[in-house]
Image: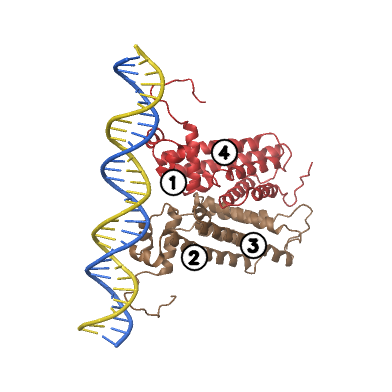
Chain colours: A red, B brown, C blue, D yellow
Amino acid sequence: MTQSTARTRGRPRSFDEGQALEKATLVFRSKGYDGATIDDLVAGMGVGRPSLYAIFGDKRTIFLRALRAYAEAKGALATTALLEPRSLRDSLAGFLRHAVVTATEEGSAPGCLIICVAPLVDDAEVRQFLQDVSASTAALVERRFRDGISAGELPSDFPVATRASQLVDLGRGLTMRAQMGAPRETLLKDAEEAADLVLLPQRGDATSEG
Amino acid sequence: MTQSTARTRGRPRSFDEGQALEKATLVFRSKGYDGATIDDLVAGMGVGRPSLYAIFGDKRTIFLRALRAYAEAKGALATTALLEPRSLRDSLAGFLRHAVVTATEEGSAPGCLIICVAPLVDDAEVRQFLQDVSASTAALVERRFRDGISAGELPSDFPVATRASQLVDLGRGLTMRAQMGAPRETLLKDAEEAADLVLLPQRGDATSEG
DNA sequence: CTATTTTTGAACTATTTGGTACGATATTTG
DNA sequence: CAAATATCGTACCAAATAGTTCAAAAATAG
């Protein structure tokens, strides 16, 4: 779909580059980084071995590309959940719900490439990327809290940074439990309760409900 | 120390079985399960290759033994933190502090064998063990909450199961951040704030402080 | 239809890895 | 000191793995 009419010379590829990367993500999610062999990727991506090296590079490069694509998709989902116009509680719950849903997708191994797999990869570039993703995710939640203060959904002294970090940590916990086999229903319920938790009013808090 | 006087025939071992298992834990924590080769274990445990197989078995068996020993040690720490006589808030904060401290120990790779490494191991026995550990950890926190209700530290309608699960999830989040390189100081601060969060009074809650 | 270009599939090589065999070594027993 | 026993270190083998080579296939350009 990206450039279907841009006809190029030579034998056409038998696969779509983006789809192949998505399939690589599935392989890494189910086997981990070290556990995934080149043969696993060849089988899972539907790409011949020489083409794999020619077009995607070695395993490390494939993983980095899959990770970036995965983070972009997941980040877009999170941004939508948090920044679309809806109540603050729904924004937070939606953010966590998306995390749970992608971590418990049918047909793919439970878990998350960013949270469960990538942290174990011994690579400076991966580490840096994870720190960036982590920071920007927390910043996104924090921004939603600030918007909530502006909109009068939260008191002005709401501890935005602390609560943002905590919400993200709760999401990590949910995702790890998904990886460990917890059922989606349980996690979805807990996602709601996690959203409620971080919105509990402080002592001496004067916020009122609508 | 376990049986120093129980002299046995033949050449004595050049290593201590328990210490070797601890070193195996370090290897798995730093390289992951699939990432750790037998040679890594041989080098890291200080045990010759044939002795490794003769005494500990193959990699899977070594991992299971290391995991059980690690869980027992960590469980004892958690039990102490939660069940020793101290204030409820200190119990919870202590529980999280211990998790942070072991996950950021100097001289070993950051992270936790149970939370960061084991969930990626594709093995039914490991999965079952993780579920058991997870359940008993949450049950331990829940018990501390119940004790708190009995002691008047909490209102009788405190949602013990929900808050226990959330505290454990927050701990998972802290541990994952340790794995990702977050500094101990930051995590220790966040541990305190996580303990405070789960103890925030509910709406219409009449609990008072001492 | 021929030449050119690009991908594909099979086979190949070198390296790493898991697991084992065997002689040397260190200790207890008599 | 000699026999028995258990561990240690080196070396070895088979299987798996990473990465490459090369001819056949499939498309376009002239």
Task: Locate the C terminus of chain B by quadrant.
Answer: bottom right
- Provide the residue designation for mark 4: A74
Task: Locate the N terminus of chain B by quadrant.
Answer: bottom left
Whether labels 3 and 2 share one chain: yes
The amino acid type of the residue labelled 1 equals Ala
Label 4, label 2: how far apart the Cα atoms are: 37 Å
Q: Which quadrant of the view contains residue B134? A: bottom right
Question: Looking at the picture, how far across and down is residue A144, in whole percent?
Answer: 65, 39
SS class, disc 2: helix
Task: Work out whether D28 lies above or below B144.
Answer: above
Circle nearer the viewer, 4 or 1: 1
- Provide the residue designation for mark 3: B139
SS class, disc 4: helix
Question: Looking at the picture, how far across and down is residue B161, in whole percent?
Answer: 68, 58
The amino acid type of the residue labelled 3 equals Ala
- Provide the residue designation for mark 2: B69
- Provide the residue designation for mark 1: A36
